[in-house]
Amino acid sequence: MAMYHDLLLHKNAFMNISPAPRLTYNKGSVGTREVRAAGDWEKVMISARHNIISLGCGARLWYPVNEATLSLAGSQTVRWRKPRWVPVAKSKMFKIPPRTITPKEEVVEITRLFNMYRTQMRAVRRHLWEESLRRADTSELSMQQAAEDEAEHQQILEYNHQENLRVAALREERVRKEFEANLARVEASKEKLAKQALEAQEKALHLITETQALVKTFIKREDLEEAIETAIANPIDYNFVIDQEGHIFRGCNTKPESIPEEDREKLLSVAQER
């Protein structure tokens, strides 16, 4: 309403200006608007609540200004508030607001409802307080619950101890069986290794025996010339022939009729068939 009072004070100044001046004001982010002071005065009053110019120094202006002389770079839009030093508006100076009179019945009903609400809330708070005391650590129920929990805890500990003993006995039995199985496996492995060593030793002895027997057939250096003369004098013919009956005739000069039939050599397969 103080804004309307200021507008009324400056109304004559707007109306007496000729030609009709331009009223420039800032409207937030919309931009600058131009109104005619004479024809659009009601529009100015309606929109004046939210459109004022606030300069950087804090002074509020509401009168025709020139766009070229006033820079709006530092202006900001503020909501109108009536200063404390501004007196009461003349239109409200002798206006007494009516006093609201509440009926007696309504006052009684409101008092009754408030008393009932206060009683109910007091009962709820009392109930919650007693419940908190009942659930507190020092209450009888809490102490009883703590004793039950402790007894259950001791029972669980005893059960855990017995279970540990049972599992320990099972573990010892399992370890003993595993040790016996490992010991038997080691003994079997030792026996197998001993048997393999014995077989290897027997093979080595057999090889040595065969080698020693073979060494006896070797020709010594001093008997080499005699062995050569014997081989030349007694040549060995490795050629042989086989007839249709499976008889073997060795040598190139051997004649079949020179060997009796019962002394003839036969193939092994033919001899087995007969």
Image (cartoon, rainbow, N blue to C red):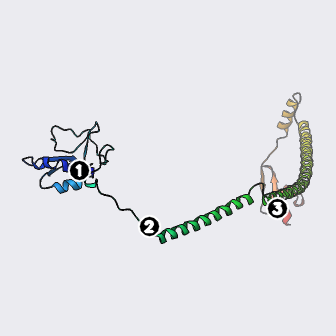
Ranked by sequence position, the earlier of labels 1 and 2 is 1
Q: Secondary structure at mark 3?
A: helix
Please name the residue that numbered disc 1 is placed on: 5
Image point 84% across, 37% down: which residue? 231
Give coordinates of residue 105: x percent, y percent: 48, 72
List x then y, in percent, for residue 274. 86, 66
Numbered label attached to residue 102? 2
Could you tell which of marks 3 and 1 lies nearer the N-terminus?
1
Q: Is residue 125 left or right of residue 170?
A: left
How far apart are labels 1 and 2 at the CA level? Answer: 34 Å
Discs 1/2, front: 2
Q: Which residue is mark 3?
A: 269
Q: Which of the 4 image quarters holds residue 215?
A: top right
Q: Amino acid at mark 1?
A: His
Q: Residue at x 79, y 61 (%)?
A: 141
Q: Residue furthest front?
A: 94
Q: Is residue 149 left or right of residue 78?
A: right
SS class, disc 2: loop
